[in-house]
């Protein structure tokens, strides 16, 4: 009888211990999924836990008491009560665990519904904002085109052309923001490091925002520290994009006659590199702490009324933060409502010295050169694009021959492979695409076919699109809408003097 009693109590103690562990794990899981810090936030759960621990101690004490002295019939009854009591506690803990799971499932469902509703709301707001941001410049483009066509005065036409150009660049900026965000979300944004004149980069950015600054009668001051290096090695294009975004926001959110300051200074020096801080400070509308928490969230702005009053996609700062993160830097924001804002970031840049191969200067993208005597084959199926490129390149002296699709381009090149010094190739063309045409030319049995530069000129600008062009044997890539500076830069690279 002693052994039977000890076995019943020992088995009951094991069941009780298992029940305690199961209760603790179920409670901890529920609290964790509900993001509650206190495990025993409800006193009833603490009471249950303490009671089960007390029972477990009682089991141990009773089991020890059975090892000495006589075992009576009442001891067997008590052992049975202990055993079935443990079974009862296990059943209750199982029910409570199921209740916790039900609570957790309801909470998870509530959060999923909330996330879905927020996502739907954000998507709706973003689409509405994008519709506004795209339709507004399109309205200006279409409207000014009609006005320009009907105008007799050349000054009036020039005014319309300038308005169309401004609206087009704004629309292109919106499209580029969306494409950049797509690259970020797919982890395909890449950095390209090169050596550039830091002050020239800043001058370029200032020139881009100067018309808006002048229109609002604002004061823009640029301060560059004496120890800031003249040359730097980093991703110039992305760095310029971030500084331009900060300055554009400062101009947008600063009232007429306000003040904007761009500062660049050195925070630290190490052999061959420096840590630079870029700061844009304004006397604009400012932000609350709560608004600042949403600044770098994609598709959002500090306040929904901001987009209605000032416009914008809500992507600029999110993209800028991602770029600075990739460059190993960090953003700092200081702002108060009605007292302006200060955005700053700091990054490490390499500082090439004279004689360093990295300090070799590259011709400026827009630098004019004479290409008289050089010939280009341009494969483009859209007539207006051929006309645009022809007008763009006419001052350079470059001789141009045009093909309306990839098949004709291959035939023209095969007739006289040595005639052409460079090929500009659209990708999407009828009959034979640019990709197929490039592959066909590269496979021709002629040394010039393997050496002639083939540059993709296409609206496909995502990294995977560029990779397809390079895999087909192309030598470079120029995105559409065509920027003359990009075309001249490619020509300077592939058509050396």
Image: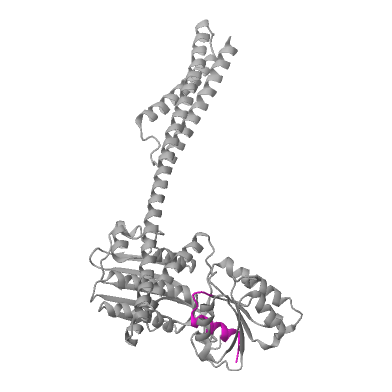
Give how far across and how far down residue 203 sits, in percent: 39, 83
Tell me what residue is drawn at x 22 percent, y 65 percent: 338
Above-or-below relation of 21 to 489: above
Quadrant for the N terminus, please.
top right
Q: Quadrant of residue 439?
A: bottom right
The quadrant of the image that shows the C terminus is bottom right
Q: Position of residue 35 (x, y in %)?
A: 40, 42
Q: Is residue 208 or residue 380 the one in the foreground?
A: 380
- Image x and y of residue 269, in percent: 45, 77
Which residue is depicted at the point 48% across and 18% down? 88
481 in magenta: yes
Q: How is the protein colored in the picture?
A: one colour
Q: Quadrant of residue 465?
A: bottom right
In the depicted structure, whether residue 113 falls above or below residue 307: above
Height in image: 184 above or below 140?
Answer: above
Q: Which residues are magenta?
A: 479-497
Left or right of 457: which side holds 277? left
- Residue 426: x %, y % from top left: 58, 75
Q: Is residue 281 magenta?
A: no
281 shown above or below 9: below
Which residue does the image show at 56% across and 82% down from the upper left? 490
């Amino acid at each position: 009888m002693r052994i039977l009693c000890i076995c019943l109590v020992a088995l009951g103690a094991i069941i009780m211990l298992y029940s305690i562990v199961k209760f603790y794990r179920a409670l901890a899981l529920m609290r964790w999924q509900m993001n509650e810090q206190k495990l025993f936030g409800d006193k009833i759960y603490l009471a249950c836990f303490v009671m089960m621990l007390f029972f477990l101690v009682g089991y141990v004490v009773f089991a020890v008491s059975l090892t000495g002295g006589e075992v009576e019939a009442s001891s067997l009854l008590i052992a049975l009560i202990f055993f079935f009591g443990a079974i009862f506690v296990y059943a209750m803990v199982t029910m409570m665990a199921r209740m916790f799971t039900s609570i957790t499932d309801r909470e998870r469902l509530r959060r999923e519904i909330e996330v879905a509703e927020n996502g739907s709301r954000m998507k709706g707001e973003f689409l509405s904002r994008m519709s506004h941001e795209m339709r507004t410049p399109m309205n200006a483009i279409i409207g000014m085109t009609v006005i320009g066509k009907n105008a007799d005065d050349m000054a009036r036409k020039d005014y319309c052309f300038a308005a169309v150009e401004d609206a087009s660049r704004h629309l292109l900026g919106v499209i580029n923001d969306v494409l950049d965000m797509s690259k970020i979300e797919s982890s395909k944004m890449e950095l390209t490091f090169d050596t550039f004149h830091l002050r020239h980069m800043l001058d370029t950015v200032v020139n881009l925002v100067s018309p808006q600054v002048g229109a609002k009668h604002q004061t823009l001051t640029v301060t560059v520290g004496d120890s800031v290096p003249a040359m730097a090695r980093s991703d110039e294009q992305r760095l310029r994009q971030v500084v331009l975004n900060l300055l554009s926001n400062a101009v947008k959110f600063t009232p007429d006659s306000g003040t904007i300051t761009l500062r660049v200074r050195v925070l630290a020096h190490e052999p061959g590199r420096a840590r630079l801080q870029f700061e844009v400070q304004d006397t604009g509308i400012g932000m609350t702490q709560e608004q600042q928490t949403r600044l770098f969230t994609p598709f959002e702005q500090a306040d929904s009324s901001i987009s209605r009053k000032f416009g914008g996609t809500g992507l600029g700062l999110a993209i800028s933060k991602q770029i600075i993160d990739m460059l190993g830097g960090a953003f700092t924001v200081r702002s108060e409502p009605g007292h302006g804002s200060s955005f700053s970031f700091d990054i490490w840049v390499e500082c090439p010295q004279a004689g360093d191969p990295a300090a070799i200067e590259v011709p400026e993208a827009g630098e004019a050169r004479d290409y008289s005597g050089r010939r280009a084959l341009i494969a483009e199926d859209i007539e207006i694009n051929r006309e645009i490129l022809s007008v763009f390149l006419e001052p350079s002296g470059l001789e141009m021959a045009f093909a309306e699709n990839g098949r004709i381009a291959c035939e023209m090149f095969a007739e006289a492979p040595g005639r052409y010094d460079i090929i500009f190739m659209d990708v999407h063309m009828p009959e034979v695409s640019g990709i197929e045409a490039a592959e066909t030319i590269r496979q021709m049995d002629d040394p010039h076919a393997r050496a002639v530069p083939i540059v993709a000129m296409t609206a496909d600008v995502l990294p995977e699109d560029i990779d397809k062009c390079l895999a087909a044997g192309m030598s470079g890539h120029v995105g559409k809408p065509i920027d003359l500076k990009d075309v001249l830069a490619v020509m300077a690279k592939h058509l050396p003097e």
